[in-house]
Image: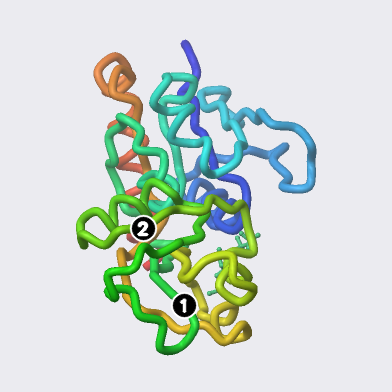
Amino acid sequence: MSYLTLAMAKGRTADQTIKLLETAEIHFPAFNKKSRKLIFYDETDSFKLVYVKAIDVPTYVEKGAADIGIVGKDNIAEAQADVYEMMDLRFGTCQFVLAGLPNTAVDSGKKLTVASKYPAVTKAYFQKKGIPMETIKLNGSVELAPLIGLSDVIVDIVETGTTLRENGLKVIDTIEAISTRLIVNKASFATKSERIHLFLEKLNRALEVRM
Ligand code: PRP
């Protein structure tokens, strides 16, 4: 039988994902975050786990290289991939926010420069608001941009609020709540329907146990 391939995001939520899979009695004994290996197999040899950068998870799933992906809503929204979003796993919770130095005006009519790791989400937000803007794509430490005049404001994720606070930035608007979601490749959902449904049921039961 072919494997059901799961793409799991590297980083903050990997431990919680592995714990949830273990609660669902799906074990990847060789998995170790520190290992440089990128593919792991479960004990029953039915699941293949690929361990990839979070922003790439939706691409693996959309293209069918993985049947299922477990990744934050921030990366799903940014990737704009054509996949089914099937479950909210309720961990990795944080928020997309617009933030800047205190008293920054965003609706003065002047074109805003907005730094973000999430240019697509940023553009969509400002288009909806009808505010003219230009995006500066950064890959990290986004909070620095308004402090040194690279941008007027930032769009970023906030979890504890510590990074904003320690850099003297304030939330101007809350854009969207984020959590870890389960996504499914559209073709796999048809061709591997039974196995995917069984897997989703197992995860649902595991989520109930964890609550
Ligand atoms: C993320 C995000 C914020 C920070 C928010 O960055 O982009 O900078 O975490 O978390 P907090 O509200 O708990 O402080 P990450 O840690 O992924 O690092 P990066 O700056 O390199 O992107």
Q: From the top left corner, tell me how far across and down residue 84 is, in percent.
A: 27, 34
Indicate whether 211 appears above or below 147.
Answer: above
Point 29% across, 57% down: residue = 125
Q: Which residue is mark 1?
A: 100
Tell me the amino acid under the disc marked 2: Met
Q: Residue furthest right?
A: 35
Q: From the top left corner, tell me how far across and down residue 121 is, in percent.
A: 36, 51
Q: Residue furthest top?
A: 1
Of residues 180 and 208, the one nearer the viewer is 180
Point 57% across, 32% down: residue = 49
Q: Secondary structure at mark 2?
A: strand
The 10 Å Cα crowd at callout 2, few under 14, some 14 to 19, many 20 or more, is some
Q: Secondary structure at mark 1?
A: strand
Of residues 98 and 176, the one nearer the viewer is 98
Q: Which residue is mark 2?
A: 133
Q: N-terminal of the two: label 1 or label 2?
A: 1
Q: From the top left corner, tell me how far across and down residue 176 is, in percent.
A: 30, 64
Indicate whether 124 appears above or below 37.
Answer: below
Q: Nearer the viewer, mark 1 or mark 2?
A: 2
Q: From the top left corner, tell me how far across and down residue 186 is, in percent.
A: 28, 23
Question: Would residue 101 be found to the left or right of residue 42 on screen?
Answer: left
